[in-house]
Amino acid sequence: MPRGYWIARVDIRDAERYKNYVAAARPAFEKYGATFLARGGPFEALEGKARARNVVIEFPSLQAAVDCYNSPEYQIAAAIRQEVAEAEMVVVEGV
């Protein structure tokens, strides 16, 4: 079964409060088998508008990735993130 991936591009407005998002999201990530493949760090923008933080998270399946995002646990975290950061997020199926 192909894995599912979250790809998130984020500009954080409040780094201290973003830590609350990270802590709140942890239970959802653990529940749905998330593995972080990229979490911030150096990058090089090649085309388009870049954001300061880029994250790639692997899940056991596309459905697990979608279910994690829609879970009550993650939605609590998402509400915090939406207050303190701007982001684009997509879920893609692996090959």
Image: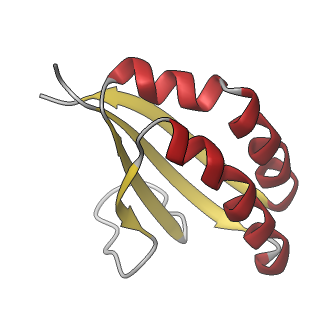
Q: Position of residue 18 (x, y in %)?
A: 76, 68
Q: How many marks?
A: 0
* Residue 54: percent from left, percent from top: 45, 62
Quarter where residue 1 is shown: top left
Q: Is residue 51 above or below residue 91?
A: below
11 left or right of 81 in image: left
Residue at 67% across / 63% down in the picture? 22
Relative to 25, does residue 42 appear above or below in the rendering?
below
Residue found 64% across the figure and 48% down from its top: 27
The spot of residue 80 in percent (x, y) is 84, 52
Q: Nearer the viewer, residue 68 or 5?
A: 68
The color scheme shown is: secondary structure
State which quarter of the image contains the C terminus.
top left
Q: Hey, which quadrant is residue 11 in on the image? A: bottom right
Q: Residue at x 76, y 78 (%)?
A: 15
92 or 69, which is in the foreground? 69
Residue 38 in the image: x percent, y percent? 35, 64
Please state which of residues 89 and 25 is positioned toward the viewer in this rendering: 25
For the view shown, which residue lies furthest in the left direction? 95
Look at 34% across and 68% down and name the residue there.
45
